[in-house]
Amino acid sequence: MRLDGRPDPRAVSCVEEMLLLQRHRGPDGSGVLADGETVIGHSRLAILGLGDAGRQPMTSRDGRWSMVFNGEMFNYLELKGQLQTALSGPFRSGTDTEVLLEAIAAWGVEAALECAAGMFALAAWDHRDRELTLARDRLGEKPLVYFSDGRSLAFASEMKALRGFHAGRLDPAAVDAYLALGYIPAPLSIFRECRKLEPGYLIRAKKGSEPRPVRWWYAERMAELRECVPDSRAALSENLREAVGQRLRADVPVALSLSGGVDSSVIAAECLRQGASPEAFTVSFGERSGDVESACCVARHLGLRHRVLEAESALDGQGIEQIWRHYDEPFADSSAVPSLALAKAIAGRYKVILNGDGGDEVFGGYRHYQHIQLKQTLKAAAAAVGLCDGRNAGSVGVYVQSKVTFRARERGRFSHRHATGNSLAELTAAAALSAAPTGALEQALWVDRYLPLANGLNYKTDIAYGAYGIEGRAPFLDHRLGRWAQTLAARHLVRGREKKILLRAAYADDLPAGVLSRPKQGFGAPIEQWLCGPLRELAGDVLPCPLLDPQQQRGRSGQQLWTLLMFALWAREWKASW
């Protein structure tokens, strides 16, 4: 969009090039709409309403709105019923996109978003008022990156599509955040000229005005809804039944990522309760681990077709290169490797895969939730005397900064003259995190939901699946389920060393007892083995990275070495500079 109002004769061809760079995300056709100073485009992944009527950009029947939409609105059938009486004639496409578009036309953007239960990033152009709205879902399941220099506004699902707009210069605050967390949280972007729209935010842009992100969703208002509701297994099952049932809606086959842990096993059991029997896939690292055995046990128990995929091949030849070629920002979560391996294996057979993402953050599954009050007290004391970061940062600041890969002082030495200070101080003071509730467990769940989940885990799965034209769906990320879970007292989630107490109880009759009692294993990769084996030569070739102080990179191992390696490989691929 030209913010100065002057149409750009190259705009259409520019948007077409941007779509080509993201064609892997939407291989089922593309379209472009131009209206004066604004051009919007879309590459389609056809899942609902597979015919041509579902192509985008799509225009409302009153002609006022045109929209491009990435993701799914899972309650589209329910909203369709509400809208039908206000519309003259039937819906045309059978898609959720059309339902959301007509909801915007009938109720306005923000009211429509409030009613939408789903994962999405969208751009809606108001032909009458000449205003463009960009919006992102509540938990950051779908990405939205943008560039704005006062003259133009460009946006996309992936940073690679913005390559023609920025100069490739690193943002020091983003580098600092990456070295701390292993990912770059919104609104930061690895490039100075770009930004990521935060979850639950929107941007309105008009000629002559500067686009500014504003919140359309307030997570803390969900917490205000805390009331005395039955914390029963039946109530949990009913909420999860709706979340899974709506995510099974598709005009194409649906698969299941079965890790062997509690969360994906519960999703598998709920699918079976609803008469669905998706084919299940499990990723292995070359040996029959406890997770693989558990997944096989669940598949046999539920009668699911099941396939175990070997991820070791991801390190052969060009396999590891997928990480820094698909991920547009440096990303240090080693579970990106099995995620890409899974996506590659099912590509062409499936466009939709269910997973158990979010179960830990909603129902309390991580080990660090055990005795969390004591741990936080000890960490605060450690921060006060300088044994970890977070001094004078409040309880949220201590929780985040006490778990970083590199401490703030180290990070400053890495970037030396480019360093701009501790980026985490500002991030933890942001609106969503600063509104975290009191109580050590409630606060930890809140922070994990709106920082590592929204910016790390969701980014990982979106890019991995999108690389092969697949859509991941996570029932535990349904905001209505999350709202209900926030009404539960902490004792129903974690008690001592027991975790996910209510979730395990609700599905005790559906799953083998050994699966429900297994401790959490995680989805990470054996990076120590890789760094000492198949990746040793590669690490020697690219490290030390010339963009960071070479002295600080020596003698590193484990997660720290992996973090530096991923940064160096990414920087070389993207030709990044300060």
Image (spheres, grey):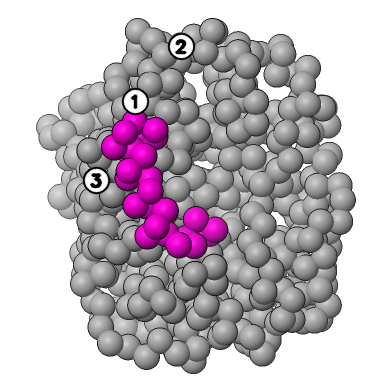
Quadrant, the N terminus = top left
Corner quadrant of residue 540: top right
Q: Which mark is residue 394?
A: 3
Q: In the figure, is residue 238 to the left or right of 528? A: left
Residue at (84, 39) in percent of width and height = 313
In this view, the residue in front, 385 or 163, is 385
Mark 1: which amino acid?
Ala
Residue designated by label 1? 173
Residue at (73, 51) in percent of width and height = 342
In the rendering, at what x and y percent does residue 335 appear? 65, 45
Which of marks 2 and 1 precedes in the sequence?
1
Residue designated by label 2? 577
In the rendering, at what x and y percent does residue 451 appear? 39, 48
C-alpha gap between disc 3 and disc 2 = 35 Å
Q: In the figure, is residue 134 to the left or right of 476? A: left
In this view, the residue in front, 408 or 576, is 408
Give the class, few, some or many, for how many residues have Cα within 10 Å of label 3's Cα (few <14, many ≥20). few
Label 1 near label 3: C-beta < 8 Å? no
Quadrant, the C terminus = top left
Q: Give the range drawn in magenta.
A: 366-389
Corner quadrant of residue 14: top left
Tag nearer the camera, 1 or 2: 1
Q: Main secondary structure of the magenta part?
A: helix
Which of marks 1 and 3 precedes in the sequence?
1
Q: What element carries label 3?
A: helix
Q: In the image, is residue 268 part of the stretch drawn in magenta?
A: no
Residue at (47, 73) in percent of width and height = 495
C-alpha gap between disc 1 and disc 2 = 14 Å
Residue at (66, 52) in percent of width and height = 523
